[in-house]
Image (cartoon, rainbow, N blue to C red):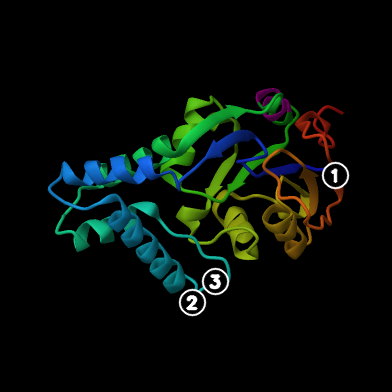
Amino acid sequence: MYETYIFDLYGTLIDIETDEERPELWERLALHFGYQGMRTGAAELKRRYLDERDRQLAEAGRSCEHPDFVMEEVFRAVAGQLGGQPSEAWLQETVRWVRTLSMNHISLYDGVTEILQRLRERGKKVFLLSNGQKTFIEAELTMLGIIGLFDGIAISSEAGVSKPDPLFFRYLADTYGADLSSALMIGNDPRTDIAGAAAMGLDSCYLQTASSPRGVAVHSTFQILDGDLRQIPGWNG
């Protein structure tokens, strides 16, 4: 039925729990800045980060409805405010620090590797369409052993636009040659994955997992309410 499968990542393929609000994250990140001569406190650093992130999102929002930002660029601006001139390597390390310090849990859902491998063995095209930061998404895909199982990986921070914006789906098609006319979108969030697919006229499969928002209307072609990815249509038939 479908020749192209487009997967969301977090809450769909990867079970993850993070907390960027924990005070220890910003306290340790302030030390990380201090090691480079940029003296700041946790509260000040968090305020500067959020203000700069929101400024960059507002600027990017002039060209699309659902923009995204690059975390390295936010930290570059914050470092500049504190008198620093960070290298690219330091900026990437800082982004990885944020992710590592915020992480409570990360793992693949059951059946993910099997499904992705089987789809490709059957000649299907498999793509990833994920909101998030390129620096840690690629690292986590590598760590979990699935980075090589996609025909294209589209990440919102790199594209500058995020789901549910139709521009992000077009970015996937233009950049990686995804045939949207034969596509099924699989995701766990009605507001981004399912709404984005609907805006593009794509069939979708809603996968309800622990991280799915509750109390939100779902208008998808298929629904899997027990979170079992192995029930998606067409992968083993």
Picture residue at 48% right of the left edge, 26% below the top: 143
Q: Main secondary structure of the magenta part?
A: helix
> Do callouts 2 and 3 mark residues in contact (Cβ within 8 Å)?
no
Q: Is residue 85 left or right of residue 234?
A: left
Name the quarter where the N terminus is drawn.
top right
Q: Which residues are magenta?
A: 113-118
Q: Is residue 151 left or right of residue 157?
A: right
Q: Which class describes the residues within 10 Å of circle 3: few (<14), some (14-19), or many (20+)?
A: some
Disc 1 versus disc 3: distance between alpha carbons? 29 Å
Picture residue at 15% right of the left edge, 45% below the top: 36
Considering depth in this image, is 177 or 150 the residue closer to the camera? 150
Residue for badge 2: 62
Residue for badge 1: 223
Quadrant in the rendering for residue 227: top right
> Do callouts 1 and 2 mark residues in contact (Cβ within 8 Å)?
no
Instruction: Give the residue type at disc 1.
Output: Gln
Considering depth in this image, is 155 or 32 the residue closer to the camera? 32
The answer to if 115 sits in the magenta stretch is yes
Picture coordinates of residue 67, whole percent (x, y):
52, 65
Picture coordinates of residue 198, whole percent (x, y):
77, 61
- Classify mark 1: helix, strand or loop: strand
